[in-house]
Amino acid sequence: MVARTAKINVIHTRVAIAVVLAVSLVWALSRVAAGASVPTSGYVLGPGDAVDIVVFGQADLSQTVAIKPDGMIALPLVGEVKAAGRTTAQLEQDLVKVYLKYLKAPAISVKVSQFRTNRIYVLGQVARPGQYELKPSAGILELLAAAGGPTTRADLAKAVLIRGKTETAQLDLLGAIKQSKDPSVALEPDDVLYLPETDARIVVLGQVNRPGAYDLVEGQRVTDLIAGAGGPTTKAALTQAFIVRGEQQIPLDLKKALDGDATANVVLQPRDMMVVPESRERVAVLGAVNHPGPLDFKPDMQIVDAIALAGGPTDKGNLSHVSVVRSDGTKAKVINVDFAKVLAGRDPKQNIALQNGDIVYVNPKGFTIESIVNFFYVLRTAAGF
């Protein structure tokens, strides 16, 4: 009888939670569908916002402008004015000051005509995981509603918000849904909301061949999970991986672990989430090679590795005059290499180790690197390479 009563109570509790969850999500979905308004009084402007600027009595100075990525707006007569980081009221005051140089007692109104959107990601136990574009005022419940709500296997009490590479926060979304009140954490661009499963599973995300959730076997280590996920991709930043364990973020050196370092091969726990980020380190191989372009930089990469990955030199390459352009951020330095000696095995020292950001140039016959160093520096600056 006691067991039956307990079972009935559990059923009633689950029904009550389901009802509260449904009502809360309907409320959040209605806000998403209606395009919930953004309060403008304290709203801080940023790149992507568009504002209506009215200079009363001056129709030719009144216009709608978008805030550029550098935070500036371009206006007639006064030129560029900083708008990002200001409220509409503050921007009105700023514009009055700059227009005072040209107008007598200018009266100016600033209103937001189009709000920017933040790109947020939802992963794990939601109906539609993926990327979402939301207004800056959107809360976590609206984000959850936009993703179709949680699945029946979601552990709402242990949701995790990931921000950048170092910040994680555990969220009790179950309590938030019951109260129809967002957690006191404002969403920021590129945040990741992750809803784990309720059972003892582990998750690997990022640069592995088969990201997803896996059953945890007692004693399982990070290399076991990486192997089960098909291994890392060629773009994986192995030394920058980490495990999210509750509110804790544990750094991992997967390169050491995969090389057999037992101390780096951490034992996994239920609900661990391993993240393998994408490497942002690059080198480029240009000139007389079969496949010129950027390559992922790897530790211990040498010039022969980079040229081989670029498909090898063409028959037009001057192999005795291969150059490495290396910049310190202000000027370029050229390191000349006799690659013909490297291939012949006569001078292994010519096979220099590369650094992140290096540009390897296989000179075509008849050209020298000195004539194009300035071009490479402009290329590097423009492309952010």
Image (cartoon, helix red, strand yellow):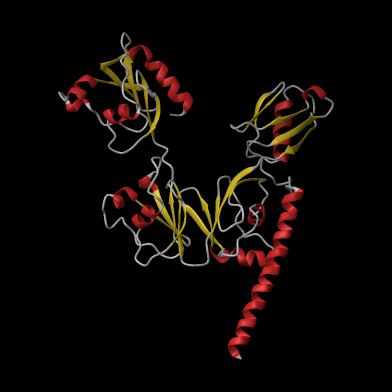
Q: Residue 276: x percent and y percent? A: 42, 48
Q: Quadrant of the C terminus?
A: top left
Which is more toward the observer, 94 or 378? 378
Any part of residue 338 in sight: no
Q: Residue 89: x percent and y percent? A: 73, 40
Which is more toward the observer, 348 or 99? 348
Residue furthest right as drawn? 57
Any part of residue 212 in sight: yes
Q: Report the side of 307 relative to 153 (left or right).
A: left
Q: Residue 250: x percent and y percent? A: 40, 56
Residue 29 drawn above or below residue 111:
below
Residue 333 drawn above or below residue 368:
below
Identify the residue at horizontal 78%, vertical 27% (top origin): 62
Q: Residue 86: x percent and y percent? A: 66, 39
Residue 249 drawn above or below residue 155:
above
Residue 371 drawn above or below residue 233:
above
Q: Quadrant of the N terminus?
A: bottom right
Q: Report the side of 274 relative to 8 (left or right).
A: left
Find residue 282 and report its image quarter: top left
Q: Report the side of 88 relative to 191 (left or right).
A: right
Residue furthest left as drawn? 346
